[in-house]
Amino acid sequence: MATFFGEVLSVYSRAVDEDEEELDENEEDEEIRRQLEEKREVNLHWSPEVSESLKSGNKLQCSDFILAVGHNAARFLSVYVLTSENWDAVGHASVWNERSRAATGITSEEETACVFYRKKDNPSVLICQVTCYIAEDQLFQWTEKVFDCLQHRELNVTVLSDSSVAEYKTADYLCCSSAPFLRSLHTGAFSGQPVCQSLEQPNIVTGLPAAVLNHCEVHRIATVVYQCYSDVTGPDSVTMETYKPALTKLSKSIQLDPAPSTDVLRKFVRTTNIQSNLYI
Amino acid sequence: MFISSQNSAPSFKDFTLVMPAVAVGNVGQLAVDLIVSTLNMSRVGYIHTDCLIPMTGNNPYATCKEDAEELHTPAEVYTAAELKIAVLQIRAPIIQTKSQKFRQLLVSWIKASEFSRTVVLSSSHAYQRDDQQLQSTPLRYLVTPSLLKVSADALKELGWKEMERVSAFPGLTDANTEQRLYIPGGGITKGLYTDSCAEDLPLAVLLLFCSEGDNIPDAFTLVNHLNNWLHLLENPSQKSNKWKIPTSWSLLFGSGIPPALF
């Protein structure tokens, strides 16, 4: 939808797809559909040690689960948390959908797009970085499967999530200096005080953070989502730093690297403007 | 599945359920928003299912700062016990491949909850009306045989128009051409109706022919139409200001504009 000033807003086409007639499908169609469904299944791959204990019925003892969704959130953890402490990669989730690359040579990408880390000296702290696209029909399943592996008692979930400032609605015109900024959203079971302002109506959260919040709301798990609205499309260090206050509450279990070296940062911040050939 | 948000499971026995179908212009959903916000209904539970696209936000019906911070999910059930009304609000589109599963879930929940009747608020593409449909009000209804048994008199009194069956192949004058129910853009409306007929559920569909755009006036038309039957608001006047617009309807056309522009 375009506004009076020609800005294009991302709104759902509200016309409903023609699902009027349920077509009589032949067996072949059904078979293709079934196979596609199977291929779209979310799979969790845990390390031998973890899968052993899951098999014997012991869920992962977890007091803090930190989930980072999006490139900035994931790299924030890479730069400020995962370098400074000893973490073990304990597993990854593999997701296949229409945006997945062709089958050749993707194994490495697939294995790094959604990884779980556990702290060595305090195994009840779990981190997950998600940088891949998870389709709408896979979000619910991802959440169910992951939370099915976690012990729910005394579990605290913190979700860091990237978003574009263009998706943020406010009656006052947003001055360009205000971005990036954080907004929070928490479940009824969350008793603390979020470190930033709550997300105002009519703004909503979608995607994986929404799936996690829905799951935790109905299962009464203390969860807070920190959504970072940024005006930069690529990963950048200013946006990453915005997440810093979100983890201060967890200082008991997670220490932030106070000043990561530029070398570490450089490794993670790709200079996107060089790759753009718009203004050569 | 239904999950109670309170400690004890609520009883819906003999309640009337009002729910939207996610359809053209979201008219049913907007109308349901008006009902929940005007009657100050309280949330009693969620429909937690993989059939809906996940979304969430703070309280869409917030009236003051204190109740603004409350998480809401894609499908929730509200009640007004004194009116014996329950409302299911659906805030997200249904995942296309799972619409049949979603219908089955709804039908079995409605059955198990023992609602006395169910009213589905829906809409259909205005541009697909045939000649006879063009020539009258844009509002139509459908009832299942089991609801017709008990509500025939009330419906007669209201003088409503039933949704016409249209010929499957317009233009063919063959006397044998079958007449079928056709609700383009109505989402699960037709499926839910036929399922309810088969399951002998007392269910009515109220629908409005509309186009996408600013559908707020359509929502008022539909909710006033429903009010003529259910009398949710006493002393009904056709003026729209009887209904309370929820805070979540703000900024429907985007954010504020830069003041330096003028």
Image (cartoon, rainbow, N blue to C red):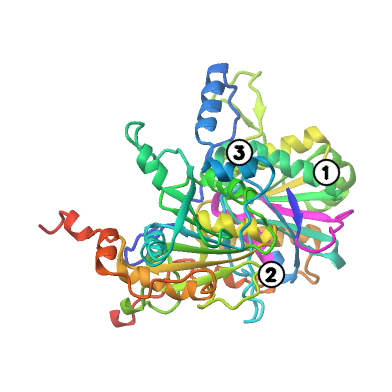
- Residue denoted by label 3: B98
Is label 2 in a helix, a strand or a loop? Answer: helix
Q: Sequence order check: which comes first, mark 3 or mark 2? A: 2
Q: Secondary structure at mark 1?
A: helix
Write down the chain letter for disc 3: B
* Residue B3 position within the rendered picture, expressed as x and y whole percent measured from the top left: 75, 54
Q: Is residue A183 above or below residue B45?
A: below
Q: Nearer the viewer, residue A60 or A120?
A: A120
Label ID, residue B121:
none
Task: Identify the amino acid type marked 1.
Answer: Lys
Q: Are marks 3 and 1 on the same chain?
A: yes
Q: Residues within 10 Å of mark 1 (few under 14, many from 20)?
A: some
- Image quadrant holding the C terminus of chain B, namely bottom left
Residue for badge 2: B37
Residue A134 locus on image (x, y percent): 47, 47
Instruction: Let me know if residue A99 is in the magenta part.
Output: no
Please state the horizontal and vertical placement of residue A70, each as a whole percent of the image: 41, 57
Q: Which residue is mark 1?
A: B111
Total marks placed: 3
Name the kind of residue labelled 3 in the image: Lys
Crowdedness of circle 2 by 10 Å Cα count: few (<14), some, many (20+)? some
> Is residue A265 visible to us here?
yes
Distance from disc 3 to disc 2, alpha carbons, whole Å, reads 30 Å
| Stretch in magenta | B5-34
Q: Nearer the viewer, mark 3 or mark 2?
A: 3
Q: Which chain does tag 2 point to?
A: B
B112 on left or right of A228: right
In the drawing, does residue B73 fall left or right of residue A271?
Answer: right
- Badge 1: chain ID: B
The residue under the point 33% across, 78% down is: B258
Mark 1 and mark 2 lie on one chain; the one further toward the N terminus is: 2
Image point (45%, 66%), residue name: B253
